[in-house]
Image: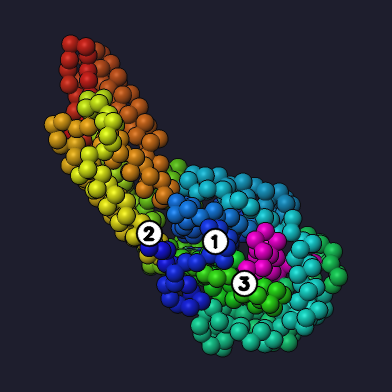
Amino acid sequence: MSIHLYNTMTREKEEFIPLEEGKVKMYVCGPTVYNYIHIGNARPSIVFDTLRRYLAYRGYKVTFVQNITDVEDKLIRRANEENTTVTELADRYTNAYNEDLEGLNVLAPDIQPRVMNTMPEIISFIEGLIEKGFAYESEGDVYFRTNRFEEYGKLSHQPLEALQAGARIEISAKKENPLDFALWKAAKTQEISWDSPWGAGRPGWHIECSAMALRFLGESIDIHAGGTDLTFPHHENEIAQSECYTNKPFARYWMHNEMLNIDNEKMSKSLGNFLLARDLIGKYTGQLIRFFMLSGHYRSPINFSEDLLEQAANSLERIKNAYVNLGHRLSTARAEEPNGVAKEQAELIEELRSRFIKEMDDDLNTANGITVLFDVAKEANLYLRNANVGETEVRAYRALLVELAGVLGLILEEEAELLDEEIEKLIVERTESRKARNFARADEIRDQLQAMGVVLEDTPQGIRWRRK
Ligand code: AMP
Ligand code: ZN
């Protein structure tokens, strides 16, 4: 069994074979930090974090690089509007981005390079391209000469004329050809700038990823990823720069997540139809957003609505409840067996694990992976219906749930503890309400607990609770 990934370059699912055995070099394009990220931007973060976790689960040592675009027109404009510096603005939103990722349980990249700290590498990359005839200077700007790279357009699979019309290519008298793109832009007056052989200026957007991937991962990498909207021109241009500079294939597998839409339109800052990731994390939880996002395949569009998010909450609850139910039976279960898990249960557990792996091996099919997680919950609950359950088996089911949910970046343990704490708080409040003869509130709490599947029992020692 091996992992297969859909490669935008070949338009096929291909067996994943890394350049170096057991190791994966992965580069995912990061955000432009002039604002908070929206829930659409969170999609690639969650999807490719899950791929990273899955590759690690399958035994690979992954090096994960994601850049921060902190030099760009929008940043400069925004800093001017806010009367602050580009650096201060970039620091603020880089921190906010990292907070949002943490809220979504996305692992921090191994390396998170910023453009401002990569200037020498970017400049020497551009110099190299000029020396080889792939780029030219024009009035303080430097452009990439697209018609010198015969394979230009190989990722997008569309005639260049169609791409050119679709992507609103900047027309400029400084360019030899409209498809040429800026590697370096001369500074306009009073703009943040860096010295270069072509005068003061700043890099174009695409060159940073080529320079950073080269610096931190080397000439050829395994996986390069981002949203589908980055395929052209961004990734096409990265390929042109890198392959002309090194004369080696840049990335082996190109992976692109489909868009998250709202009312069937791409969520984007420019359309104004966005919801901030941090607002939704606060209102719901990062776990729920993550679960919702992974309930669809990454190559299918997602239509986002809060209603759908709330529906997903019920599904996630089923998995969490199975975890909690298993925990509750631990104290009454038969003591641990020295011989390990009974054969029937051991086989079932192994089968569930292999099904999960088979689904995830198939181009990261998290939607089907989640279905397997539901099946684990179902089988665990069925097992718990036995009058006499074994601690070894209960622990094995619980460990499997934690293991598979963990690959998807879902943490069941913390949530369960939180849930228990919440229930106990409500029980205390109910007892106090009854003492104060506030029966309406006491009944309300009883109903709420009932809805959560909690049964209260009056015992001589006081109120006891258990899950249905
Ligand atoms: P940006 O800051 O616009 O470059 O976007 C950062 C990442 O979010 C890129 O990988 C984009 O492809 C991705 N992205 C932007 N909008 C959406 C969306 N509506 N759905 C999914 N991914 C998106
Ligand atoms: Zn990039």
Query: In the rendered structure, which disc, 1 or 3, sits on the residue that comes first in sequence?
Result: 1
- Secondary-structure class at tag 3: loop
Residue 214 shown in magenta: yes
* Residue at image coords 63%, 52%: 111
Asked if ligand 2 lies within 8 A of label 1, the reply is no
Mark 2, residues whose alpha carbon is within 10 Å: few (<14), some, or many (≥20)? many
Q: Are marks 1 and 3 in contact (CB under 8 Å)?
A: no
Amino acid under label 2? Met
Residue bounds of the magenta highlight: 201-220
* Residue at image coords 31%, 46%: 316
Q: Where 50 falls versus 129 (above or below)?
A: above
Front: mark 1 or 3? 1
Mark 3, residues whose alpha carbon is within 10 Å: few (<14), some, or many (≥20)? many
Q: Where 427 falls versus 235 (above or below)?
A: above
> Residue 269 placed where, x, y %?
53, 61
> Residue 94 placed where, x, y %?
62, 50
Q: Circle 2 sits on which residue? A: 360
Q: Circle 1 sits on which residue? A: 21
Give the Cα distance between marks 1 and 3. Answer: 18 Å
Q: Circle 3 sits on which residue? A: 250
Give the Cα distance between marks 3 and 2. Answer: 26 Å
* Residue at image coords 27%, 52%: 351
Q: Is residue 140 left or right of 447 when viewed as pictured?
A: right
Q: In which quadrant will I find the N terminus?
A: bottom left
Q: Choose top left, top right, bottom left or bottom right for residue 164.
A: bottom right
Q: Are marks 1 and 2 in contact (CB under 8 Å)?
A: no
